[in-house]
Amino acid sequence: MTEEHVPPPALDEVIQHPTRLTIMAFLSGCLEAEFGAVRDYAQVSDASVSRIVSALQDADYVKVRKGYVGKRPRTWLALTAEGRRALTGHLDSLQAIAESARHAAATDPGDGPNN
């Protein structure tokens, strides 16, 4: 009996790194977030957030807005529509992988006493 080969779900290579995914997930919950709030949530350095945001900007997943609060410069980050679509697709793929693993674990013949 042969099982039809089904390709694995496609993860988004741009956002599959845990810190990139963390930042994308955080931004999905708001219209925009101040750079420092994103940095604090992701628990990474300013330089790491800057590097990650640059990569996400290059993919058109994040937009950056600069401005001032009083005389202090501020940077705000927001997901683009494309970024929201990419995150949804990535999360759907992760869910499919998890469901497949749960199914395989539940039906694994290797659970018997001889294994």
Image: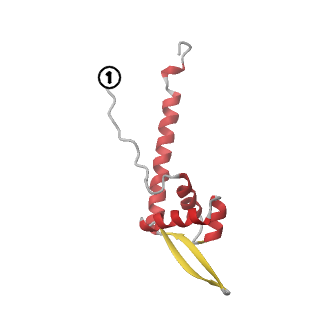
Q: Nearer the viewer, residue 108 or 77?
A: 77
67 sits to left or right of 92: right
In this view, 1 is above or below 40: above
Indicate the secondary structure of the residue bearing disc 1.
loop
Which residue is found at the position 43% from the left and 53% from the top? 13
Picture quadrant of residue 47:
bottom right
Which residue is found at the position 44% from the left and 55% from the top? 89
Place of residue 94 in the rendered image (x, y in percent of width and height, measured from the top left): 49, 47
Position of the N terminus, as image quadrant, is: top left
What crowding class fits label 1: few (fewer than 14 Cα within 10 Å), some (14-19), or many (20 or more)?
A: few
Place of residue 101 in the rendered image (x, y in percent of width and height, measured from the top left): 50, 35
58 sits to left or right of 43: left
- For label 1, the residue is 1
Which residue is found at the position 67% from the left and 63% from the top? 40
Q: Nearer the viewer, residue 66 or 28?
A: 66
Place of residue 34 in the rendered image (x, y in percent of width and height, measured from the top left): 62, 72
Place of residue 53 in the rendered image (x, y in percent of width and height, measured from the top left): 51, 66
Picture quadrant of residue 8:
top left
Which residue is found at the position 43% from the left and 54% from the top? 12
Coloured how?
secondary structure
In this view, 13 is above or below 32: above
What amino acid is found at the position of numbered circle 1 in the picture? Met
In this view, 82 is above or below 95: below
Residue extending farthest bottom: 71
In this view, 70 is above or below 53: below
Residue extending farthest top: 114
Q: Nearer the viewer, residue 69 or 89?
A: 69
37 sits to left or right of 107: right
